[in-house]
Image (cartoon, grey):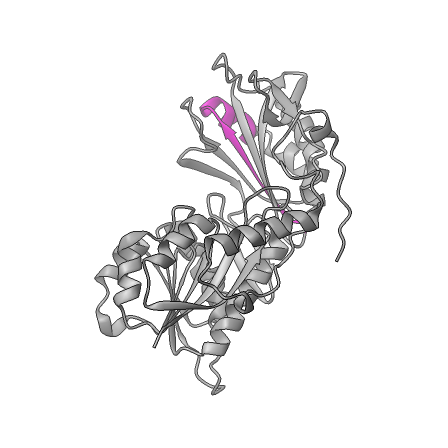
Amino acid sequence: MLFETPRCDYFEAAACRSCALIETPYEAQLAEKESRCRELLPEIPEAAWLPSVVGGVRDFRNKAKLVVGGRRGSVTLGILGPDGAGVDLRDCLIQSPAIRAAIPRLAEFIESTGLAPYDVPRRRGELKFVHVTAAPDGALMVRFVTRGEQGLARLRSGLRELRRAVPEATVISVNLLPEHKAVLEGEREELLLGSSLDMRLDGVSLHLRPQSFFQTNTAVARALYAQAAEWVARVDPSSLWDLYCGVGGFALHCAGVGAAGAATRRVLGVEVSEAAVRSARRSAREAGIDARFEAADATAFALAAPREEIPELVIVNPPRRGIGPELCAWLDGGPSRHAIYSSCNPESLARDLASMPSFAVREARVFDMFPHTRHLEVAVLLERAG
């Protein structure tokens, strides 16, 4: 399959280099990622690698994290340059069409509020970021990150105008980040409209709240969940846990009926975010899926579980640091016959797999969640050896 290499004016002008590989033919990008995974995971036989899932060359990103820069009358939405000045990226081609269409209208609305963009070098101003997430049906979640109560009040008073400007927005919120530090959001979130964005994937609606995690490439996320569901259906465990479950993507897609056709397997998702757990429970209830979700630290939950309650299969989808030595030891020494490990960092995956010698990789697959960068997602099906 051949992909036409996109032309990015921002990259050519050296205004943005976030997509470091955008001038590399896409086939070469994918081949390099595959080669890297094979080098890091040499114990996986070549025959175990399934064909990679491609991420696309444009229009694939479902979330834009836009820095508000410039000044009143000349607001930029994009990134900050080396000098701390705003660089406008409203025509960035990797964003989904729904996001790209909304950005100019959001800029006009920001201008109408009179809120000053936050000046990072001078530590002045009010509005710091706008985060925009697109659902498969084109609905949007719009989050403003502001410095304090003044910004919150101004945005709340302008809600009607914002809804006219961006009618696709079904969720609108304001996040308060008073500190001057290199983070994208603060702890306090004020909802102005709606509560969650409906990310409908293959018959399951995942309800994404403003501070919940979701994969940035919807098409690849759909393929990732489908692959996990296929592996689970093949192994056909009577019980499974989804650790680091987020809003329940893996658990809900893998609940399914067993090979015998009647009984639904016992499914439990564990996630530290209580908001994400509430979303997962709602999704399960709406879909008629018999799955439980608990708010807890994944490692602490697993270590405290009685051995007789440990499931036949465990799914883990940790952050970049991996699952760590304690959870590796628990899995390696436990009774679970199978595991699925989905990783956004092949280095930490290789380290964790080396700490679980009782398991062998039966199949593996690269999911190109982040085209034009060196980042990737890789998932493996593990089976207890012997």
Q: Is residue 128 left or right of residue 301?
A: right
**Quarter of the rendering containing residue 7:** top right
Q: Horizontal and vertical percent for residue 220? A: 60, 56
Q: Is residue 288 visible?
A: no
Q: Horizontal and vertical percent for residue 244? A: 39, 55
Q: Horizontal and vertical percent for residue 252? A: 48, 66
Give the number of marks: 0
**Quarter of the rendering containing residue 93:** top right
Magenta stretch: residue 145 in it?
Answer: yes
Image quarter where the C terminus lies is bottom left
| Residue 328 vs residue 134, the one in the foreground | 328
Where 368 falls versus 386 (above or below)?
A: above
| Residue 4 vs residue 156, the one in the foreground | 4
Q: Is residue 364 visible?
A: yes
Q: Is residue 146 left or right of residue 337?
A: right
Where 126 falls versus 63 (above or below)?
A: above
Where 189 falls versus 50 (above or below)?
A: above
Image quarter where the N terminus lies is bottom right
Q: Is residue 167 left or right of residue 68?
A: right
Where 3 falls versus 160 (above or below)?
A: below
The magenta-colored residue range is 138-156
